[in-house]
Amino acid sequence: MENFRKLNHFDENGSAVMVDVSGKIPTNRTAVAEGTIFVGPEVLRAITEGSVKKGDVLGVARVAGIMGVKETPHLIPMCHPLLLQKCAVDFRVDEERSAVTAVCTVKCQGQTGVEMEALTGVSTALLTIYDMCKALDRSMELGEIHLVEKSGGKSGHYVRAAAEQN
């Protein structure tokens, strides 16, 4: 049971618990996450030209990412429901790598961080791109999903080291 004491989602008996944040002072919290979907040149062209039959791929993926952020406590069992103040999902198209990178920024003033929300937003956006383009190519690959930066709370400011960047 000693290892469970190092993780805040386990009690002294090793049972999974939601962290008690009731004694924490609310602070401004921000998290930025990103991830990439690798697609073939044909798919990338269809996305950028707007010729995918299901519609505006990046527009729908943006809305899906925002919805994913808002649904995080329903998907990740130990996440707290949060009153979010900002959520943005943006995309970078990389023709050289034949890829689309989703970037999700989430902000709130609260007692717990928004890292899981940002990561869920990125994942949902990328899955939506896959769903909308799978008729063109089922070999697309999602990856490189990671936290880029977070601020606020007791653990302070985190920025992913340059050596860890893609």
Image (cartoon, rainbow, N blue to C red):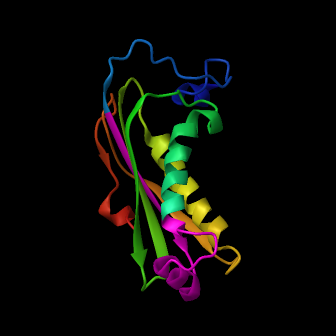
In x, y percent, where is residue 81? 52, 27
Is 44 left or right of 93, judged from the image as shown? right
Which residue is depicted at the point 55% across and 52% down? 64
In x, y percent, where is residue 122? 50, 55
Which residue is nearer to you in this view: 157 or 52?
52
- Which picture quadrant has residue 77? top right
Q: Looking at the image, how many numbered discs can be counted on the residues?
A: 0
Relative to residue 74, is residue 5 depicted above or below? above
Which residue is depicted at the point 44% across and 13% down? 22
Viewport quadrant of the C terminus: bottom left
Magenta span of residues: 29-58
Relative to residue 41, is residue 23 depicted above or below? above
47 within the magenta span: yes
Viewport quadrant of the N terminus: top right
Which residue is depicted at the point 61% across and 72% down? 141
Which residue is nearer to you in this view: 28 or 67?
67
75 within the magenta span: no
